[in-house]
Image: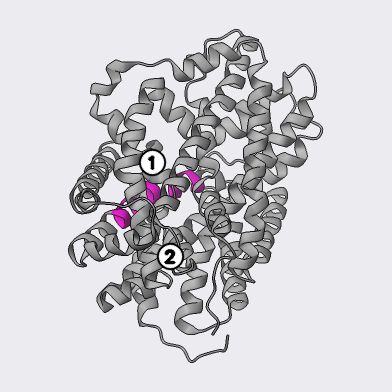
Amino acid sequence: MKEELWNSRFAFIMAAIGSAVGLGNVWRFPYVCYENGGGAFLIPYFVALFTAGIPLMILEFSVGHWARSAPPQAFKKINKKFEWFGWWTALLPFTVAIYYVVIMAWCFSYMIYAVDLRWGSDAAVFFSNFLGDTGTPLNFGEISIPVLLGLIAIWLSVFLILYKGVGRIGKVVALTVPIPTILLIILTIRGATLPGAIEGISYYLTPNFSQLGNVNVWLAAYAQVFFSIGVAQGIMITYASFLKKKSDLSNNAFIVSLADAGTSFLAGFTVFSVVGYLAMKQGIGIQALGSDIAGPHLTFITYPTAISLLPFAAAFFGVIFFIALLTFGIDSAFSMIEPISASAHSKWKISKAKTTGIMCIIGFIFSAFFAAGNGRYLVEIMDHFLANFGLVLIGLIECLILGWFFTVRKLRDHANKTSDIKIGRWWEILIKFVIPVVLIIILVMSIVENVTHLFMGYHWWVILLIGVLPVISIFLISIVLMKIKLKEVGS
């Protein structure tokens, strides 16, 4: 079986950046920043980036490049007992992709709706009608045909990008990574020329240095970095396994991580310039918009409302905004499928086209459940628990396995052999002590918060069924996959 390799270092870096940069950069970072000290938040954010984000990125690049295999096989090489963990890291992003693609399907429909600003004067009511919103996760409602059609388009795109391997991925990311960044810059320039934009940007960046003494702000910074750069999902391990033997690892990790951070920072200008304009047009203070500046509400209600108020070329900038989101999202979406596809291909020698096709079909079937009227609530609950518990648990166990049950010095030496930036013993200390402690604190605080305040006020059994059960199921399925043996089906 011929070894898959990236066509060039540029292709790998673009693919890794594309995976790291996604919808969360646009709708999560700006809000987290302004909620936690504005411009002052950048201090703990960059401390977190250099003490957790980049070290974890180097770790995963090193593991993938050293093992030259997908996560299950990589952790099996460390110890046969850890193969299940590799499957867990590959299954989690696949599960995330199931609902992530649903949000992309919403963006796909809104890209079309932006042509004639179909949401009209009340974007909130339009969004609710578009989804067939039932107002509760317990009432299934009807399937939204536009969302279903969007799902077909997105999953088909993911299959066409992945089924021929990393060579095709390299060609796709050469376009899909720079295009949304260019569009974001265009939107930022346009936003900065609007009345009220300066007030919005000032609100986003005004530093509140008193917040630096708040431990929750520092934890928010570490959480943002951890969730944003794409580690603990098997993706970076998988992508690094396709690198050539003499590839630079540490330098690549710095480039990818800083590109992700830069995109998040830029998105803040894009969002808050328009938010400032919207607040001025509605005659309210920016703080009155509150949580409307984050998540799906920002993308499908707040921003469309602002677009409709633009004095000229409103439809043009609306289309640009949703194209930017789609191109940001597609790289993240197909990168979430690649680990499980590569893992199945590697273990059972099923052809890459078959494994990719099977995963996309399974993904589409499960995604279709989110196209119903309760889909919005299912997305919110699953995302909350998979991100706050699934990802953190994987990151923690990854550090413990590689830091304490494996000679992490081997990975440092491996990275230093081919890297311009040499890492010292400080890196081992971060992996073995600092990052696990931070992740344990985040995990404990998340558990306490969810026990004392049930997420969004839902009944405990709803939380267990929709939020906790998927996290546990992924863990159990990973153990089952480790045991399955199939005859070779051909490559």
Magenta segment boundaries in residue numbering? 378-395
The kind of residue tagged 2 is Ala
Measuring 50% from the left and 14% from the top, which residue is drawn there?
A: 202
Q: CA distance from mark 2 to mark 1?
A: 20 Å
Which residue is more in the foreground, 305 or 175? Answer: 175
In this view, the residue farthest toward the top is 283
Q: Nearer the viewer, mark 2 or mark 1?
A: 1
Q: How is the image coloured?
A: one colour
Measuring 39% from the left and 77% from the top, which residue is drawn there?
A: 481
Q: Which mark is residue 146?
A: none
Q: Around disc 1, counting alpha carbons within 10 Å, would you say few (fewer than 14), some (14 to 19), or many (20 or more)?
A: many
- Give coordinates of residue 477: x percent, y percent: 38, 71
**Taking the image as drawn, is residue 406 in sight?**
yes
Tell me the residue that label 2 is attached to: 90
Measuring 36% from the left and 69% from the top, which residue is drawn there?
A: 66
Does the stretch in magenta take in 74? no
Q: Which mark is residue 225?
A: 1
Residue 398 lies, with reference to residue 269, above or below; the image says below
Q: Around disc 2, counting alpha carbons within 10 Å, would you say few (fewer than 14), some (14 to 19), or many (20 or more)?
A: many
Does the stretch in magenta take in 391? yes
> For the residue labelled by badge 1, is the local secondary structure a helix, a strand or a loop?
helix
